[in-house]
Amino acid sequence: MSTPPADPHLPAVHLRPPRNWINDPNGLVFHAGHYHVFFQYNPDAPQHANVHWGHARSRDLITWEQLPVALAPTPGGDDADGCYSGNAISVDGRLVAFYSAHRTGRWWQPVTTAESHDGGHTWAKRPESLIPQPPTDTTMYRDPYVWQQDGRWRMLVGSALADGRGAALLYESDDLEHWTYLGPFHTSSPADPADPAGWECPQYATFGDRGVLIVSDWTPQDGPSHVTVHTGHEEHGRFTTTAPPVRLDHGPDFYAPALLKAPEEDRWLLWGWSWEARDESWAHEAGWAGVLTLPREITLADDGTVGQRPARELLALRGERVLHRSEHVTRSGPVELGEVSRTFDLTAVLTPDPADTSGLRLITSADGSEYLHISFDPTACHLIVDRSHASLDARAREGVYTVPCPVARVPRTPVELRVVVDRSIAEIYLSTGQVLTVRFYPVGDGPWRLEAHTTGIAGSDFTVEAWDLNAVGLRHETLLACQLRDA
Ligand code: FRU
């Protein structure tokens, strides 16, 4: 039994297997007292190939157990080159997973299923795929999402239409076996045929008679891009939006999120995939790639805005409060707020200088040259996350990302942030519901510390609190289970 070497970038409270590759969360379902999270998983290498469905479960979203791999490609079968993404339902005491069967060289992935009668420990695949062929006018087809509505089963499948639009295709069934194709549920706007789009991993949440459709935007040229959310309502199998689509996450490293309907009324949770933002060779050396985001609660406001915040259960991960400061900061110099660990949860209320940029700097090298910078520009009304100096190692990606106008354009309106940092991932939540996920790879000699900055004359007010996060609950069983499996 080998103990994995300490890796300063391996997240401690975010869900992922200890080694190798992970991409999309799949099959998120509450079943018999557990939240089940399956995920695209290559058990053999930190690269996207030979994708299985890994499996973890939790009763409380805090302590996770890693269960045996749920789905593995069947040699010679329809899914011989990968059990691609999909979802799962809990019905009559069993779990049914709907997934995309991948064969190299076949542009569509037939929808197929597997069933488990023991809480997801063992699975039986159906012998033939459920929906072997896509409709004729499509050029991409994968990622089923099944849910029950008004007594019928419905399924969306991610697709690209021959005319260049991305689409979520709708099917219906009375018995989960016989499915009728009803056409596109919703599509992207007419596209430039020279620049076609596709929608991967459609997800659909209902809040009363309103609906939220989440799709992962993909193009044949560039592959995965970002995630958009469409709000509106559905009538007779067609979704009508009541607002233009917006980004679900404003960061560069967030894709293919999946929804879980929690047992409570109207409570929806969401996990996304956060990919690596460093050279493949580095991930290869490290032996792992990808991580799931924290579970997030999704809300739909009366004005149609979709909000996200960390699931309330995660407050229980907070350990020692390492910092609690209120400061008035002027341009005459940054104010040192104190040290933090490499896995922490922070809240900040920033009442910004009306004329200039103010924010927090997470400094990770003793000389201050390596830092992640989070600031607010009241003139442009942008929250800005700058990782241009976040790693002294040139193999880490750089970039500056913004959340457009998170607050009212009224001078000195406070900006409220919650920032969860876990070694190489930061999730930055605004109290207004927007979020930005970013990966960063500090290699500095630390310790990690926070500074408050402003370039304005009048100065800004900061109130900052930070807690260490306890990793024990989340990783312990995961590591243990994997070590036992590998022993
Ligand atoms: C999204 C995606 C899905 C596909 C899976 C393959 O990241 O490309 O469309 O089913 O990943 O791993």
Image (spheres, rainbow, N blue to C red):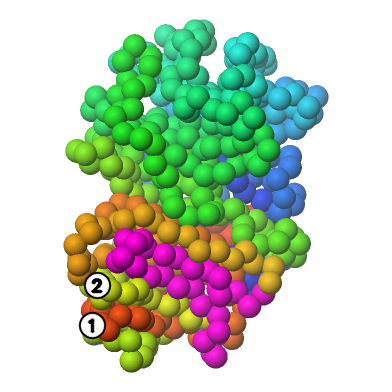
Name the residue at 54% across, 31% down. Answer: 199
What amino acid is found at the position of numbered circle 1 in the picture?
A: Ala
Q: Is residue 372 magenta?
A: yes
Q: Is residue 337 magenta?
A: no
Query: What's the mark number on residue 458?
Result: 1
Name the residue at 28% across, 42% down. Answer: 305
Q: Quadrant of residue 418?
A: bottom left
CA distance for labels 1 and 2: 8 Å
Q: Quadrant of residue 349?
A: bottom left
Q: Which residues are magenta?
A: 365-393
Query: What's the mark number on residue 191?
Result: none
Name the residue at 43% across, 49% down. Answer: 249
Classify mark 1: residues with Cα within 10 Å, few (<14), some (14-19) or many (20+).
some
Q: Nearer the viewer, residue 302 or 147?
A: 302
Q: Nearer the viewer, residue 458 or 198?
A: 458
**Any part of residue 444 in sight:** yes
Name the residue at 61% across, 26% down. Answer: 193
Q: Is residue 390 above or below residue 336?
A: above
Give the residue at mark 2.
354
Question: Could you tell me which quadrant the N terminus lies in?
Answer: bottom right
Disc 1 and disc 2 in contact, CB within 8 angstroms: yes
